[in-house]
Image: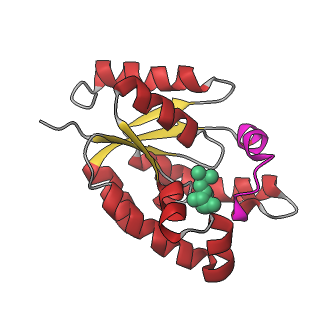
Amino acid sequence: MQLPSIFLVGPMGSGKSAVGRHLARLLRRRFVDSDREIEERTGVDIPFIFDKEGEAGFRDREQAVLEELTAEAEIVLATGGGAVLREANRRALASRGFVVYLETSLDQQLERTRMSRNRPLLDTPDPAARLAELMETRHSLYRELARMTIHTDGRRVADVAREIRDRLSSSAPGVS
Ligand code: S3P
């Protein structure tokens, strides 16, 4: 029997990709990052897609990729921070796997995204205000979707990944 996939959601700078890669290693599963998948398929980076097609164009591509990836069993999937915005994505994530929310403070998000050149939504004079604004609309979506919430502030990637693994094996044994 195949185990359900694990889908990581949370804002930019919550560590979805780093934690996801580590967790996949711990669970001996394949790791997939939806943003990297979009970049591989298009041959260009996320800022280029935002630039040419706008956010709506990016969201269409994201939805198409998520529709495919959420159909796969036994993967660990890192989603983009805005994946929860569309109802179709939320439905696919909630019904096809086990959703984990990496909850992260604004300070920590800011700190972890400070050097990033690959996040068009933060290409603004006031990234802190932008992150706060995004969180305002998204926090409840992350919370409602997730079957497990993990705090990531001030913690190492390996510790967060281990906590997810341990909590899965004690409270959701059918998943890991
Ligand atoms: C976005 C987050 C990014 C990427 C895109 C939009 C968002 O992913 O999908 O830049 O809307 O929060 P990360 O959360 O991996 O940075």
Residue closest to the far left: 1
Q: Tell me: residue 48, above or below residue 157.
A: below
Q: Tell me: residue 100, above or below residue 123.
A: above
Name the quadrant containing residue 69.
bottom left
Place of residue 111 in the rendered image (x, y in percent of width and height, measured from the top left)? 78, 39
Residue closest to the far front: 43
Between 32 and 91, the one nearer to me in the picture: 32
Q: Tell me: residue 146, above or below residue 128.
A: above
Q: What's the image's color scheme?
A: secondary structure
The residue range painted magenta reads 107-120
**Residue in view at x 62 percent, y 65 percent:** 46
Does residue 52 appear to the left or right of 151 in the view shown?
Answer: right
Place of residue 135 in the rendered image (x, y in percent of width and height, measured from the top left)? 63, 53
Does residue 95 appear to the left or right of 46 in the view shown?
Answer: left
Residue closest to the far right: 125
Place of residue 61 in the rendered image (x, y in percent of width and height, measured from the top left)? 47, 71
**Residue in view at x 29 percent, y 45 percent:** 97
> Within the magenta stretch, is there residue 117?
yes
**Residue in view at x 25 percent, y 40 percent:** 4
For ligand 1, the image quadrant comes to: bottom right
> Within the magenta stretch, is there residue 130?
no
Between 71 and 128, the one nearer to me in the picture: 71
**Residue in view at x 61 percent, y 40 percent:** 14
Name the quarter where the N terminus is drawn: top left
Does residue 43 appear to the left or right of 65 in the view shown?
Answer: right
Name the quadrant containing residue 45.
bottom right
Name the quarter where the C terminus is drawn: top left
Q: Is residue 91 visible?
A: no
Place of residue 37 in the rendered image (x, y in percent of width and height, measured from the top left)? 47, 58
Q: Is residue 89 visible?
A: yes
